[in-house]
Amino acid sequence: MARRIVGIHERLPILESLPLSFQHLTAMFGATILVPILLGVDPAIALLMNGIGTLIYSWITRGGIPAYLGSSFAFIAPAMLVISTYGGFNHAQSGFIFFGLFFVVVSFVVKFWGIRWIDIVMPPAVMGAVVAIIGLELAPVAAQQAGLAPWPSAVGQVVAPFAVSPNVLLVSMFTLCVGIIGTVMFRGFMQVIPILIAVIAGYFLALVMGMVDTEVIRNASWFALPKFHAPVYDLNAIIIIAPACIVVLAEHISHLIVTGKITGSDLMENPGLHRSLLGDGISNILSGFTGSPPNTTYGENIGVMAITRVYSVWVIRGAAILAIAFSVIGKVSAAISTIPAPVMGGITMLLYGVIAVQGFRMFVEQKVDFSKNSNMVLGAVTFVVGVSGASISIGTVQLKGMAFAAIVGVMLSLIFWGMGKAGWMNKEA
């Protein structure tokens, strides 16, 4: 029996939509609250503005792109430098507002100049590799959470030999197994919520094993408004944070293309990259003025859609509404925040792997001919740069992983395009 596919514009009954929306919320919750915690601000404000930002994005894109906007990790390093050097988080907010304005400007450039240039700067050989790297560079984090690899140590710290914790391994592998079995064996409505079922099953096992901090839930208040922060204009902060905008732009384009491949829609054309950038930009301007870290489209939610084949933008909107509600309901958000790392590690091993496979799927669907030397070199170099740990620093921003690979791939593509125009490349290349 063929699995049911829920289209982008399809609206499901509330009893079906609610668990599907909650599934998306649990997938992105841990990452989206980690960023404000690292930056020393109230996680509730990020949850609130991510929810509002997602609704704004959905409206601007005319309900045509099922994407959730969560807290971006690309700005952590430059924002920390601004916070430690120039007086606090509110100075970094001016850089976040600039980021939103940057996306708005680029959206108008794309609207008037079109997107044909993307085929030149990021041909399928590069784009497929970049999309695969999105999942591959996240994979070590999943392994660390799952207890299969050690967490990075501080510089100079003496590290004991890595030892697998039996309890952590049991919970993570149990969660992963439930997710795998659910994905390939569940039928009916359970077939579209295997991620949620796996997280719930793993959570209860962890609870029984004493791995859940229930004290956090008991101490949380039922109602609490997030803490807002007004921005302070600081040109130095803008200069420090600006390079990260390029990183997120590459990420945004990659996410939109892979979402289009998953949903079987040309989202770059309809509703269009320009609307996607505009929606993300406006939501980030608003976040910058209220005191929330900047946001970006989330790979975790793309992975959920790839597994469940539920692409409904109404489900994403439901997740945004739940995020807004949970930002002021302390006990609920506290309960979600107590999901142990092994549970999330187990399920994200599946999610991140699915994202990586989408890149290889792109090679197949775009019929990338790797017998051509140019395609072989583009794919090979992009992959190696992305997965090798290679990095380069531009000011305070360190380019590595997907971002560095995307930039190297773009540069090589432009060089090959120029050589082709000049007639310097043979037909076999």
Image (spheres, rainbow, N blue to C red):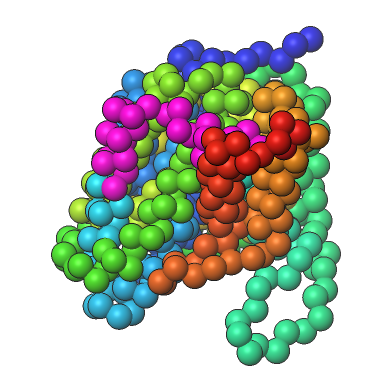
Front residue of 155/268: it is 268
Front residue of 318/121: it is 121
Instruction: Write the start and end of the magenta stretch as one range.
Output: 102-129
Tell me the residue at 71%/15% (across/down).
3
Residue lying at the far front in this picture: please name it.
423
Quadrant of the image containing the N terminus: top right
Tell me the residue at 33%/60% (across/down).
242
Q: Quadrant of residue 272?
A: top left
Q: Would residue 340 be visible to someone looking at this image? A: no
Q: Quadrant of residue 308?
A: top right
Q: Could you say where residue 42 lies in the image, as x and y percent from the top left?
A: 34, 61
Which secondary structure type mostly characterizes the magenta part of the structure? Answer: helix
Residue 36, compared with residue 348, is above or below; it is below
Tell me the residue at 38%/53% (across/down).
245
Q: Quadrant of residue 277?
A: top left
Q: Could you say where residue 346 lies in the image, as x and y percent from the top left?
A: 72, 50
Residue 181, compared with residue 200, is above or below; it is above
Q: Would residue 396 be visible to someone looking at this image? A: yes
Q: Could you say where residue 167 lies in the image, as x and y percent from the top left?
A: 79, 62
Query: Is 118 colored magenta in this rendering?
Result: yes
Q: Is residue 130 left or right of residue 41?
A: right
Quadrant of the image containing the C terminus: top right
Q: Could you say where residue 33 lies in the image, as x and y percent from the top left?
A: 45, 56
